Image (cartoon, rainbow, N blue to C red):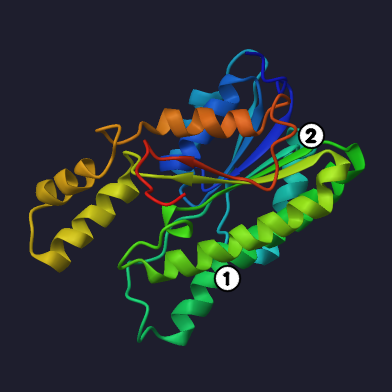
């Protein structure tokens, strides 16, 4: 299928590893020019080389999402190098595993600034251009905790869920202007973050990491963890021309794991 997005420009936040990296590679594979934003410059330079192909340009940017003062300068750099942002992938690192009770208020505020306020601010910076051109894709990558809260991940469950409410509201505001806003939800995808969470769970429960992974696998009808490339492929479709009528949605990429409707 021709996704119709070759020559478009995408900004992928949190692009240096895991799901962000997979989405960047998928978009570049469709001929999209990609701006790669994350703190790990070395990883992004390597990723940029992987993304570049005939007709495809990649721009690595050192970008700390918790610092909103750099947003305008970074977006201007993208516009000068690649053109205006047509596709925005809102993807941030995950917060530390914690219970819901007893967390310091400063931790909640810091994680809100990094995971929520930053995403909204970047979106507000690129959205006017999308509306003016009457074409845009805003895709926010969250967690299965927004559908079924995950024990021990209170910060993630709460803060990512706020992005779902924001995305759904924004989708209704801009749908008539050719801009879609969707949320994509990963199940158990084989990334460093998934491995890290399994290790922390194993520590809390006094179990081997292999045992924790086995119990997770038993809950996945597909019988395996997802490949990051599979997640990237779904993300690329949601950013495509054929997906123009998909907006305000939560799309799960979970191998059937999430039990709720």
Residue 171 visible somewhere in the drawing? yes
Q: Can you say whether 141 is above or below 84 in the image?
A: below
Q: Residue at left 66%, top 25%? A: 32
Of badges 2 and 1, the one in the foreground is 1
Mark 2–mark 1 CB contact (< 8 Å) = no
**Left or right of residue 12: residue 190:** left
Question: Mark 2 to mark 1: distance in Å?
Answer: 28 Å
> Left or right: 222 with respect to 3?
left
In the foreground, 85 or 38 = 85
Residue at (32% x, 75% y) in the render: 99
Numbered badge on residue 83: 2
* Residue 113 tag number: 1
47 left or right, relative to 102: right
At which x and y percent is residue 33?
A: 67, 28
Within 10 angstroms of label 2, few (less than 14), some, or many (20 or more) residues?
some
Q: Quadrant of residue 222?
A: top left
Q: Earlier in the sequence, mark 2 or mark 1?
A: 2
- Please state which of residues 77 and 160 is positioned toward the viewer in this rendering: 160
Instruction: Say which quarter of the image contains residue 173.
Output: bottom right
Q: Secondary structure at mark 2?
A: loop
Q: Position of residue 211 (x, y in %)?
A: 10, 49
Residue 184: give x, y in percent of width and height: 54, 44
Q: What residue sits 8% from the left and 64% below the top?
A: 206
> Does 54 appear above or below 50?
above
Q: Nearer the viewer, residue 31 or 143?
A: 143
């Amino acid at each position: 299928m021709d996704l119709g997005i070759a020559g478009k420009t995408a900004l992928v936040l949190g692009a240096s590893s895991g799901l962000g990296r997979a989405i960047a590679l998928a978009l570049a594979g469709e001929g999209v020019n990609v701006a790669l934003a994350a703190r790990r410059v070395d990883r992004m330079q390597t990723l940029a080389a992987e993304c570049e192909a005939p007709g495809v340009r990649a721009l690595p940017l050192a970008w700390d999402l918790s610092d909103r003062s750099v947003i305008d300068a970074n977006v201007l750099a993208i516009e000068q190098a690649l053109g205006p942002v047509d596709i925005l992938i809102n993807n941030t690192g995950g917060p530390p595993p914690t219970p819901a009770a007893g967390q310091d208020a400063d931790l909640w505020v810091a994680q809100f600034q990094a995971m929520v306020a930053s995403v909204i601010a970047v979106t507000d910076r690129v959205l006017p251009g999308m509306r003016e051109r009457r074409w845009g894709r805003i895709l926010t990558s969250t967690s299965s905790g927004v559908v079924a809260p995950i024990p021990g991940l209170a910060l993630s469950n709460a803060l990512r869920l706020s992005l779902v409410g924001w995305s759904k509201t924004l989708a209704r505001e801009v749908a008539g202007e050719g801009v879609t806003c969707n949320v994509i939800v990963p199940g158990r995808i084989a990334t460093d973050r998934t491995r890290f969470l399994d290790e922390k769970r194993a520590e809390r429960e006094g179990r081997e990491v292999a045992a924790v992974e086995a119990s997770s696998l038993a809950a996945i009808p597909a019988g395996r963890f997802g490949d990051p490339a599979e997640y990237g492929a779904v993300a690329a479709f949601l950013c495509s021309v054929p997906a123009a009528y998909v907006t305000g949605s939560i799309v799960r990429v979970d191998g059937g794991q999430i039990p709720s409707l």
